[in-house]
Image: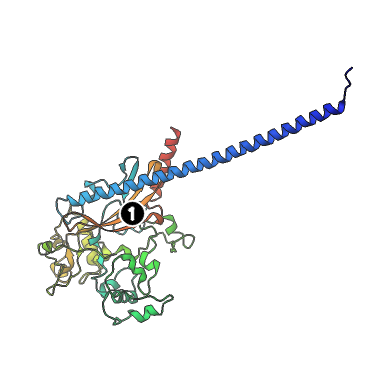
Amino acid sequence: MEIHNPSRHSFRHRTQGSVLIIVMWVSLGLVSVTLYFAHSMYFEFKAAGNVYEGHQAQQAIDGALRYATYLLANLEEPGTLPEVDTYVAEQALIGEATFWYIGRGQESSIAATPVFSLVDEGSKLNLNLATQEMLEYLPNMSADFAAAIVDWRDEDDEVSENGAEGDAYGRLNPPRQIKNAPFDTVDELMLVYGADPLLVYGEDANYNGILDSNENDGDTSPPADNANGSLDFGLVEYVTVYGKVPQEDEGEQNSDNANESGEETLQVNVNTASEAVLSVLPGMDTSKAQQLVSYRATQGPLGADIEWINQALDDGDLTQAQEYFTGVSYQYTIDVAAVGKNGKGFRRTQFVVDTAGEEPVVIYRKDLDRQGWALGQNLRQELNQFMQQQRQR
């Protein structure tokens, strides 16, 4: 006869219930761990995609440099900036990546879309050759800083009027030495006594020649700006440390790089220089510079010819300035921005190439990734729309 024990059945049910709860908790834990790792792997996948697209963009930059140096090495007329319509300057495809050459316009302070082209370094004022008076006439320049620039690059310890030599640098905190030698880069201006980021770089924080939103919002985001709807350029827009015409071309252009004593003299490419640069040359002013810029805009490709200036200005207006004009340049900036597949992995590198020798040579390189997006808001929106269309397919 079987004796029924209710307590044993109750214990068995409680045990089974406990096991079920434990199994459910274990299952929930496993699901949570699975979701956690799936989430982590998703972000790893996205990060890997960004790294891959960044590598694509970097490869595109390398390809863009080779393309540009090929163009410069095979010019029909050496020493002349190739016309933009003779090469691909924007949205050029290399594999799945795309690149642009970020150029400079004629100082448009309200532009929303960058100019895409190579940049002529000969169109700028050479920091190592310009006189103090020329430097003083540059936009936003002060007499003190112009004098300090001259003192920084000269070999003596004699203080120019309003300038600064070793003693002034020794009083800085922390103190530093004055160079007393030519500038090697334009960025070196930040080491000169009295330098200020707004003076040197202006409001153009990412150096793309256009007014981006963060450059028109006051102190909300860097850089500090006046939020007046117009872009104030810094000195880097107008000056260079490059720009030398090879000796064999000097006589041909009637604009010698050296004077009778053999010293190198300043030259500016009148075919590409901006109004601000032309206006600081001896014998020039804003009105004459405007005439030159306006007149050359009506001409076709100028090549190395500078005879057109005789039609743009009266001969009497050119007496002092003509010796500073040239129609050739041999140093160019190749400022390349690129993105990988789907418009991601933005990269940007700036090169300066010297074409005076048998082959173009890169003489300067600067990575500008940290300066941020430089292709304008319109292009960003176009790329975002393209990505959305790709996802929907």
Res 296 visible? yes
Relative image position of residue 334 (x, y in whole percent): 28, 54
**Disc 1 marks which amino acid?**
Thr
Q: Residues within 10 Å of mark 1 (few under 14, many from 20)?
A: some
| Residue occupying image coordinates x 49% and y 60% | 220
Query: Residue 76 placed where, x, y %?
Result: 14, 50
Query: What percent of the width, then of the height, locates residue 349?
Result: 33, 54
Q: Nearer the viewer, residue 35 or 185?
A: 35
Residue linked to disc 1: 349
Q: Is residue 104 visible?
A: no
Q: Is residue 22 above or below residue 204?
A: above
Above or below — where is 383 with respect to 334?
Answer: above
In the rendered image of this protein, does residue 234 appear above or below residue 113?
Answer: below
Rendered residue at 36%/46% (across/down):
57
In the structure shown, which secondary structural element does the residue marked by tag 1 occupy?
strand
- Quarter of the image containing the N terminus? top right
Residue placed furthest toward the top: 1
Residue 49: x and y in percent read 43, 42
Q: Quadrant of residue 311?
A: bottom left
Task: Name which quarter of the figure residue 34 lies in.
Answer: top right
